[in-house]
Amino acid sequence: MEVILTQPFVCCPGCGNPSDHVHCQCQRTVHDVPCGGRRVVLRLSVRKFFCRVPTCLRKVFAERLLDLVQPWARVSKRLLEELKAIGLSASAKVSERLAPRLSPGEPFGCSPTIPFRNREASKIRKTSYARR
């Protein structure tokens, strides 16, 4: 499914000022909750804009769809919530059986995963405990 955004201007996430000066356009691929037993992949046409405020730290920024997907995420908020619900409500074995239903046609290892918040911090903690 292809989604094209048509807002005439977008507010800069750095300073909040509106901008209509388009820098370029790029494609984002986002996995969403299946519909009718088939997986849904959204192809988003996202524009990047220039921020014209000289004091703003962001010179270029992209359109954001905060209701649908977090910035830089490849999984919709709805699919992420479904995966979290399965993981928190069931054991690992049951979750492994149920999760492929959210991405039919793909093996479980290829389906979108829930991102870790801070991988570097968890590595530091694991190594610091191992040295004791």
Image (spheres, rainbow, N blue to C red):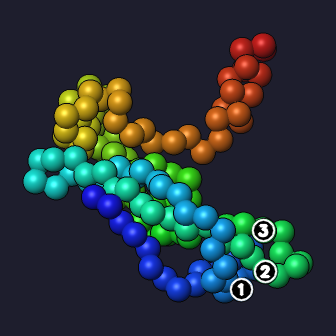
Q: Secondary structure at mark 2?
A: loop
Q: Secondary structure at mark 3?
A: loop
Rounded to the nearest whole Å, what is the CA distance between mark 1 and mark 2?
9 Å
| Mark 2 or mark 3, earlier in chain | 2
Query: Which residue sits furthest right?
Result: 55
| Residue at image point 56% right, 40% down | 116
Answer few, some or many: residues within 10 Å of disc 3's Cα (few below 14, many 20 plus, some between 14 and 19): some
Q: Which residue in the protein does label 1 denote?
A: 17
From the image, tell me which residue sits under label 2.
52
Q: Earlier in the sequence, mark 1 or mark 2?
A: 1
In screen coordinates, is 115 left or right of 36?
right
What residue do we see at 29% from left, 43% from top?
86
Vertical side of 47 occupied by 99: above or below: above
Q: Which residue is mark 3?
A: 58
Cβ–Cβ under 8 Å for marks 1 and 2: yes
Q: Position of residue 89 (x, y in %)?
A: 29, 44
- Furthest toward the top, the residue is 131
Q: Vertically, is 96 above or below 14?
A: above
Give amino acid for label 3: Arg
Relative image position of residue 129 (x, y in whole percent): 72, 20
Per the rendering, the mark at residue 115 is none
The amino acid pointed to by label 2 is Arg
The percent coordinates of residue 75 (x first, y second) are 41, 50
Helix, strand or loop under label 1 = loop
